[in-house]
């Protein structure tokens, strides 16, 4: 598909990118041993470049994508020729492989980006989604704790909020697993959870799809005229991860919460289609038609950053909030055990049933964001 690089995120999203200084945000990684799972993907690659620029003691890029790692290695060598780095082929589902890498490299900071993220693919392949997103997260957490990592940062998604699909359910379980472990006073490894919206131009998102369609003068397809999503740029995504890590490891009171970004109002996917068409000097529905198809299985009209049962607190960062909510640890444990057995057997029916059982309706009204230490109290959009 065509690259989305040619499109200006500010023009397409209809807002300015937040002021970001990645060098200062990454300063606390200087001299640290860092490992990134899913390092070859859109976010993993952007995060790898930011970490490399922060003068870490070492950087391990871990992914199952051979070509992606090959490309990333070349990019890192161009950016930081003297960086002590290692690119490792492996899958987070393979705990023995993970354990060997952790034994060799002893990472202090772990960014867990690896996941199956495409809603439709995971909907059709729930056992694969659970094996990677749930069991892979447990494996990464297990070895991070075993080898004494200071912190593991889980990258989650707004689709984990009152999930309507298999992918969202797997990420909700992963969130709650990590949050439960973060509250374990016996563990020296912090588990910091970060909840994303959509990242502009990331693989599998609408932007590369629309770019592909526009370049070939094909109809641009949207699933519903009112579908709305939260979007952030790559730099905003990386800054959220780095800020969340910094806040989390310096604020013990944040244990058990999760961090998310104020990304402004949601954006209509139809508006993104129109702006992308006009940015190329073409006319929507004249030169290129916009065709409404239908909602896919598990797709919502709109997403939310915060569930009604979750509360949100402002942090010392004006752009990052901390969400809290109840966790049923027994349910997390039972579901993990059941998914482990079902995934080993590739039992799609059992996996789908367990994920559906895990999804429960939130009926409580959300509490307002509580200001902290004079930090700005910015409004966050909540799904009702």
Image (spheres, rainbow, N blue to C red):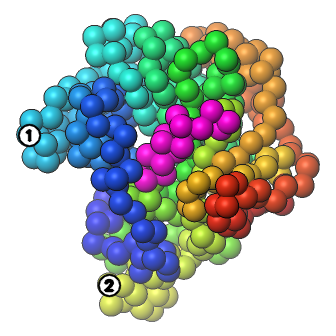
Question: Along the horizontal axis of the image, is 343 left or right of 64?
Answer: right
Residue wearing tag 2: 280
Q: Magenta region, mostly helix, strand or loop?
A: helix
Tell which of 133 and 189 is nearer to you: 189
State which region is magenta: 238-254
> Is 211 rendered above or below residue 167?
below
Mark 2 residue crowding within 10 angstroms, few (<14) / some (14–19) / many (20+) = few
Question: Which quarter of the picture shows residue 7?
Answer: bottom left
Residue drawn where x is 25% and y is 23% of the image: 88
Q: Is residue 246 magenta?
A: yes
Q: Tell me, yes or no, if residue 264 can be seen here.
A: yes
| Image position, residue 340 (x, y; %) | 62, 13
Circles 1 and 2: CB atoms closer than 8 Å: no
* Camera-side residue of 97 and 315: 315
Disc 1: which residue: 81
| Numbered label attached to residue 131 | none
Viewer-proximal residue, 210 or 321?
Answer: 321
Say which label, 1 or 2, has the lower sequence index: 1
Which callout, 1 or 2, points to the residue nearer the camera? 1
Q: Is residue 229 left or right of residue 36?
A: right
Kindly state the secondary structure of the residue where label 1 is placed: loop
Quadrant (top left, top right, bottom left, bottom right) of the N terminus: bottom left
Left or right relative to 316: residue 87: left
**147 up-or-down from 384: above or below:** above
Considering only vertical position in the picture, is 44 above or below 376?
above
Q: Residue at x 51, y 14 (%)?
A: 145
| Residue occupying image coordinates x 52% and y 63% | 231
């Amino acid at each position: 598909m065509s690259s989305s690089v040619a499109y200006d995120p500010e023009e397409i999203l209809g807002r300015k990118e937040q002021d970001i200084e990645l060098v200062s945000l990454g300063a606390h990684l200087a001299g640290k041993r860092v490992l990134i799972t899913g390092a070859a993907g859109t976010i993993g690659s952007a995060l790898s470049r930011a970490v490399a620029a922060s003068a870490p003691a070492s950087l391990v890029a871990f992914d199952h994508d051979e070509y992606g790692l090959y490309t990333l290695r070349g990019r890192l060598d161009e950016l930081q020729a003297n960086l002590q780095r290692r690119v490792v082929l492996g899958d987070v589902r393979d705990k023995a492989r993970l354990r060997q890498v952790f034994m060799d490299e002893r990472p202090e900071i772990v960014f867990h980006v690896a996941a199956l993220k495409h809603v439709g693919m995971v909907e059709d392949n729930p056992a694969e989604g659970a094996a990677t997103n749930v069991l892979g997260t447990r494996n990464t957490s297990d070895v991070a704790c075993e080898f004494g990592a200071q912190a593991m940062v889980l990258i989650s998604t707004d689709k984990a909020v009152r999930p309507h699909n298999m992918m969202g359910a797997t990420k909700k379980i992963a969130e709650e697993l990590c949050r439960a472990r973060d509250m374990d006073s016996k563990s020296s490894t912090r588990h910091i959870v970060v909840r994303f919206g959509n990242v502009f131009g990331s693989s599998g998102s609408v932007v590369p799809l629309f770019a592909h369609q526009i370049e070939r003068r094909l109809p641009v397809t949207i699933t519903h005229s009112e579908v709305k999503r939260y979007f952030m740029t790559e730099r905003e995504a990386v800054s959220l991860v780095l800020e969340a890590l910094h806040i989390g490891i310096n604020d013990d009171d944040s244990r058990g919460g999760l961090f998310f970004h104020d990304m402004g109002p949601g954006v209509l996917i139809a508006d993104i289609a129109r702006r992308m068409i006009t940015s190329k000097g073409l006319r929507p529905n004249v030169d290129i038609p916009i065709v409404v198809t239908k909602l896919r299985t598990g797709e919502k009209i709109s997403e939310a950053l915060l569930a009604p049962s979750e509360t949100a607190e402002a942090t010392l960062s004006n752009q990052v909030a901390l969400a809290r909510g109840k966790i049923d640890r027994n349910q997390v444990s039972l579901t993990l055990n059941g998914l482990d057995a079902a995934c080993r057997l590739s039992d799609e029916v059992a996996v789908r049933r367990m994920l559906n059982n895990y999804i429960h309706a939130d009926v409580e009204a959300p509490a307002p964001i509580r200001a902290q230490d004079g930090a700005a109290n910015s409004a966050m959009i909540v799904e009702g």
